[in-house]
Image: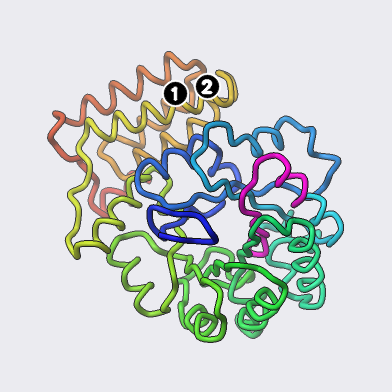
Amino acid sequence: MEFLGFQLRNMLFVAPMAGVTDRPFRQLCKKLGAGLAVSEMVTSNSLLYGSAKTRRRANHEGEADPVSVQIAGADPAMMAQAARYNADHGAQIIDINMGCPAKKVCNVMAGSALMQNEPLVAKILEAVVAAVPEVPVTLKFRTGWNRENRNAPTIARIAQESGVRAIAIHGRTRADQYQGNAEYDTIALVKSRVAIPVIANGDIGSPRKARQVLEYTGADGVMIGRAAQGRPWLFREIEHFLATGEEMAPPGVKEIHDILRGHLNELYAFYGEETGVRVARKHISWYTKGLVGSANFRHAMNQLQTVEEQLAAADEFFLGHGAANERLRYLDDAQAMKAA
C-alpha cells in the first residue's frame, strides 16, 4: 500500500507516545501488523540534541522503513533546524506534534496549544517543509483547543497549503485531554475538505471499532495509541478483520508469554539493565492488566531490581495461566474493579 512514496503493509499506524513508542515497541508493533510507527516526540531545542534521552529517541538502528520522527516546538526556525537534523540522521518522514495536551508541552505553547495561533502554525509548517524538501512532512493535531473552538478544518487547510503531505487527527480537543469519548464528526469534516491523506485517531481499541471509524470518517487509515499498550498484536487483528470480515482468535498463553519475553529482552538491550528493568515494569503491567492474579503480581514485580528476577517472575506468572493452546483468564468487570 503506497503512502508518501513508501510501500506500507497497511494503513494502520502506531501513535507517537512519550515514554512508550521507543525503538523496541515500534519494531514489535510493525512485526505484529502495523504499517507505520511514529517515534516518540523529540524536542526542537538544539541544546538537547546531545542528551542521552534524545539520542535514544533518535536511535533507529535496524528499524524497518519508513522511519518517522516526531518533533515538537513553537519556534519556526528551531523546528526547521530540528527537522533538518533528524533528516540528516535517518528520518524518512518528519511528523510535527500539535496534538500533545500535556501541560509541560502546552505551557511553552507547543503541542496542541499551537492550535490557538493559526498564523504561527502556518509559519512553523512552511519552515519545516522548506527545511527538508526531500522528506515528506506530516502533522498530528486535535479537533481544536476546546469544544467551542474546533478549528481542525482550518488547521488542515493551512497544513495542505503549507506542503504537509498527510495529517492525523485525534478526535478530542486539547481541553478534553483523554477524558470522555473521541468524536469523529470533525475528522469526517476535515476529510471532506482536503485532498491529502487523513488518519483517524482516538478510542480505536478493536477491529470492529477500526472498521466503524474508517467507514464513518472516510479516513485513509487509523492510528492507535493506548489500546496497543500490552496488546501489540491488535494491529494484526485489525488487519485480518478489515481484509476478511472475520475476527482473529486471540493469542494463546504461550504466544503472549513469548511476545512479552522478546519485548523485555529488547528493552534490556536498548536501555541497559538498570533503566531497562524500570521501563519494563509499565509494559509488564499493561500485558497483564485484567488477568486473574495480576494485581498482586504487579505489586511484587515493582519491587524487583534485576533482569533475572523480572524474567523469572514473568515466566512463573504466565506458566501459571495454562497450557500453550489455552487463552488467558481475564477478570470480569466486577472482579477487575475490586482488584483495582
Label 1 crowd (10 A; few <14 / some 14-19 / many >=20): some
x 58%, y 47%: residue: 39
**Label 1 SS:** helix
Horizontal arrangement in the rendering, residue 170 relative to residue 74 (left or right): left
Is residue 97 toward the left or the right of residue 2 in the image? right
Image location (x, y in percent) of residue 188: 47, 81
Residue at image x 55%, y 50%? 38
Which residue range is magenta in the image? 83-101
Please name the amino acid that badge 1 sits on: Asn
**Residue on which the image places disc 2:** 269
Say few, some or many: other residues with alpha carbon within 10 Å of mark 2 (under 14 / 14 to 19 / 20 or more). Answer: few
Of residues 100 and 305, the one drawn nearer to the viewer in this rendering: 100
Residue shown at the point (19%, 62%) measured from the top left: 244
User: Percent x, y for residue 71?
Assistant: 70, 53
Distance of mark 1 from mark 2, alpha carbons? Answer: 6 Å
User: On the image, numbered disc 1 is attached to which residue?
Assistant: 265
**In the rendered image, the vertical position of residue 276 relative to residue 133, given as above or below:** above
Asked whether disc 1 touches disc 2, contact meaning CB atoms under 8 Å apart, the reply is yes
Residue at image position (41%, 25%) is 300
